[in-house]
Amino acid sequence: MLFLTPHSSSQTFHRTVCLLSCPSSASAMDSLPDAIVHHILCSLSNARDVAACSCVSRYWNEAVPYIPSLYFPRNSLDGAAAADATIGRMVASAVCLQDLIVYCPFSSASLASWLDLRCGTLRSLELRMDGIASKPASGGDDEPPANELECIGVARGLESLKLWGVSLTTSPNWNCFDKLRFLEIIGATLRDGALSDALHACPNLTDLALLSCNGVAALSIELERLENCRLDFLGPGNCSLHLSSPKLQILEIQGFSWIRVNQDHHIRRLCIAKSSGRVYKVELGKLPDLEFMSLRGIQWRWSAISSILYCASEVRHLIMKIEFCGDFDTLQPFPEIDLVDFFNNHPRLCKFEIHGALFAAFCQKNSLKNLDSKFVIPYLEEVIITVRSPLNAEQKLNTLESVLMYSVKLHRMTIRLSQMKNCNEAADDFFKDICKLKYMNYNVVQIE
Amino acid sequence: MGKTIKLISGDGEMFEVEEAVAFQSNIIKSLADEDNADDCIPLPRVDSQILSKVLEFCRKHANSPSVHTKFAAIPSELCPKHDGSAAGASSSESSSAHSETCRACYDAVMKLVQWDLEFVKVDLDLIHHLLKAANYLDIEDLMFMAVEGAANAIRGNNPEEIRKLFDLENDFTPEEEKEILKEYSWLDDPFEP
């Protein structure tokens, strides 16, 4: 603080063993060793709490500047005359500031000044930018506005960066965030070139999340250390992804039509979804470490589904919810999927969830009577099946019965009957048959 | 019971506890190493009421991973459900592969954190004693939780309420008060009694 003389005794801000002699009968908190008081204060980060502590006493006022984290919630400075100035003063006092989170509105000019001050110590930055007031473009309509993210580039020591509601349509001109491991951008408007430049500045990322973003047509990621990648791109368009990351373990993506992952990876958790539009092609190479896979979407090309199922032979937990296949605009029903082949190709399957049309495609091309009597579904424990229509009722019931019969470890089969279209006699009959199935296998089957 | 340690509180009460419990305290651990195993370890600065609370904490934490250890470092031996069947894991790498995906380990640590948070939901006076005891005995996890308990008492309160809780005086000079009022005009009056 500016107006108090510095505390004369040495200040330590980590836990220390202080065998000070404390008066044995004292119960007042102020007999706590300094180091403990510092430790308590350093646990605070909410700006109001920090400010309140500054006003408590001289000693606390001197200790507050060493608090390493500051968090300004959304409405924390509502009603404050000059929120930017308030944040500025608190950031200026926080001489060892490592973590800064600002959810309340601020201007980009102020942000630049805060970061200039604290770039030496800042390790983690989280900003809500949808309320940001940018400098107006000085050259009229032709000149693009100065990129509001450019000033973040000075914080070279950042390890974690999280941005909400930004516009990344022009290059941020960052140099290099050597130490950046976590990058999360949510609710952003992006452009290919700008995003690519931004990622180039972060070569050592281990965790990347781009969620609820739009504006990208093609994304290419080459990150040596990336382990965890979550991408959620909105819109029905045909977006393509090319990813090359040898340490990749978790990949969760939504919104891509063309997906190519360099086959040197260790993916154990894979989620691919496309909530509007089509998935055309998925190339991942082998998936030897795969434990969990989820495939979702309205329409996937059948070749994409079959190729990924082929590669996912080690999967233990599988969720499939795809409505249609088809190479072009026309929505097509699925070709038949042989039950025996499917379970033989995925022998480690332990939990399985399948919906509607895909479930309906299961059949027994080779009659099970002709089968090698050694067919078994060895590890399957839980199955969730969603049935949407009573069409092909007999085939569906056969599938259910076969799964029950050949699964040696099955302890729960949940059948969800949702919005039965064609609510007529056929639906009623089907429902009755399913109930019969349930009664015959009451300890395993349940209906929702 | 395994090997036990005898501790004597400041007011003369004797506590006999297992080594794993007592050795949560680095101080007790180093004193026990030096001393003759038959002697009791005196703890003059901790009275019996506090020591029994401290030992309650240590008992809970004796065979659990520290809640501040990153999950990757939880060794499989401490997993409540580990049955040694982690598929394909080699012994040196099994700890990290095990605990990152092991739901049982994660749940166990979360439960312990909940227990700890309840443990420090006590009046500030007791927290004060726990802080001093944790400092004196050098018990990392207890210090961490007691600090969190004290910090919780501060959160959401205005300066005057904080002063009352911590038994502190407003020792600013009138000039200093004026400066503070200017700086923190957006807070409710910090000097209102």
Image: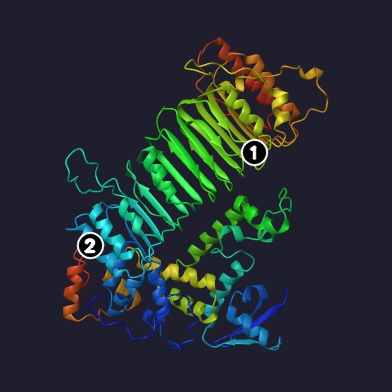
A378 is higher (above) or lower (below) than A278 = below
In this rendering, does residue A446 appear at all? Answer: no
Question: Residue A86 shows which numbered tag?
Answer: 2
Q: Is residue A288 left or right of residue A199?
A: right
From this view, report whether residue A160 is shown above or below residue A429: below
Q: Chain of mark 1?
A: A
Res. A368 mark: none
Quadrant housing the C terminus of chain B:
bottom left
Image height check: is B122 above or below A205? below
Where on the picture, by quarter, is residue A13?
A: bottom left
* Residue plotted at (31% across, 51% down): A150
Dot 2 amino acid type: Thr
Give whichever of A84, A311 is nearer the camera.
Answer: A311
Position of residue A312 measured from the top left corner of the image (x, y, whole percent): 65, 34
Give the chain letter at badge 2.
Answer: A
Q: Which mark is residue A287?
A: 1
Provide the secondary structure element on which disc 1 rests. loop
At horizontal 68% and vertical 30% (from top left) the residue drawn is A442
Q: Quadrant of the N terminus of chain B?
A: bottom right
The answer to whether B178 is drawn above or below residue A426 in the figure is below
Nearest to the observer: residue B149 or residue A44 = A44
Q: Position of residue B23 (x, y in %)?
A: 63, 76
Tag 2 secondary structure: helix
